[in-house]
Image (cartoon, helix red, strand yellow):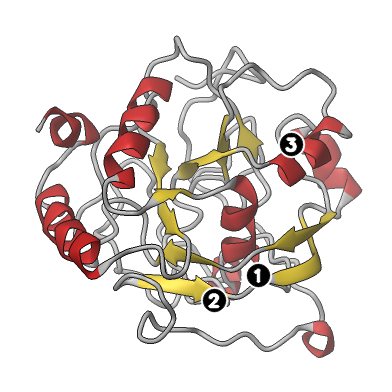
Amino acid sequence: MKRFLLLVGCVACQPAVEPSVDAPADEQLTQVRVDAAGSGCPQDFVAIAAASAVTLGEHDAARMERFGPNDTIGATPFDVSGYCIARWPAPGVKGANWPTDGLSFAGVARVESEIARFGLRLCTVTELLYASAGRENRRFPSEAHSAPAGTLCETDDQSPRPLGSFPECASSFGVEGFGVRSTWARLDAPMAKALSTQREALTPDAGGLAIAGGTARADTYYAPDNYGIHFHGEDEAAYADDSVRFCADPGALSAKEEQALSAWLGVFSATPTFAAMLAE
């Protein structure tokens, strides 16, 4: 059970559908889905171009008060460098099942070490927020989240359907699988600075790691949307609703690394848990 604030958690309940707070249509910027071909990104990764002074995070004071400044990223302008992000959460293969377990602090460190062999890395919190919210700064992964539950987006974070089952529930960049489980990430310096100005308590000494985004449930103590953020310490157990997604710098992978990565992902996608994969 997850803890409230940093100690006590909420039990699962029926997911609630929150209203979308997308920007007015005339203020939205057209975004292009970029395929890996010619982008310098691995297969099944999405290339996201650099952006300057893009505002990301919660802008509604009532929701900031409801979920608290410790567990919600407030609206802040960020500069984002170009990067590649996996279209789906780990294992990142369309049709693969979500791992049935989660990742602890130690497990994330092992994943980070493992994927570095293939030129991959953990995404940063800012990269995840931008990939999910887009320039429109959407609170939810896509407009589909304002539709009735179960129609276009996954609503079960405990037993989600295979990756790629909800192609219409994607961000404006075409990245899928947000809003199902939260994502371990590197706490980058710009995000850490933004959080330091709003948090009521010091960020836990979490070794530069954070868990970004919300889940398909609305009963979490952190915001259950793209703006949610929380932390786990080194001694905490793994939670099944904390997953991971892979990122890379454009052009970072050699042909040999891409080949090795493809083979590794094939094994990973056939493995039911993170624990079993890391034990290989």
Q: Quadrant of residue 70?
A: top right
Q: Earlier in the sequence, mark 2 or mark 3?
A: 2
Label tally: 3
State how far apart marks 2 and 3 are (Cα): 24 Å
**For residue 96, side relative to residue 48 (left or right):** left
Q: Are marks 1 and 2 in contact (CB under 8 Å)?
A: yes
The numbered disc on residue 134 is: 1
Label 2: element kind: loop
State how far apart marks 1 and 2 are (Cα): 7 Å
**Residue nearer the viewer, 261 or 139:** 261
**Residue nearer the viewer, 241 or 20:** 241
What residue is drawn where x is 48% and y is 26%? Answer: 11
State how far apart marks 1 and 3 are (Cα): 20 Å
The x and y percentages for residue 129 are 63, 56
The numbered disc on residue 192 is: 3
Q: Earlier in the sequence, mark 1 or mark 3?
A: 1
**For residue 239, side relative to residue 92 (left or right):** right
Evaluate whether residue 134 shows in this view: yes
Looking at the picture, which amino acid does disc 1 mark?
Answer: Gly
Q: In which quadrant will I find the N terminus?
A: top left
The x and y percentages for residue 172 are 58, 77
Q: Is residue 49 above or below residue 274?
A: below
Q: Which residue is mark 2?
A: 173
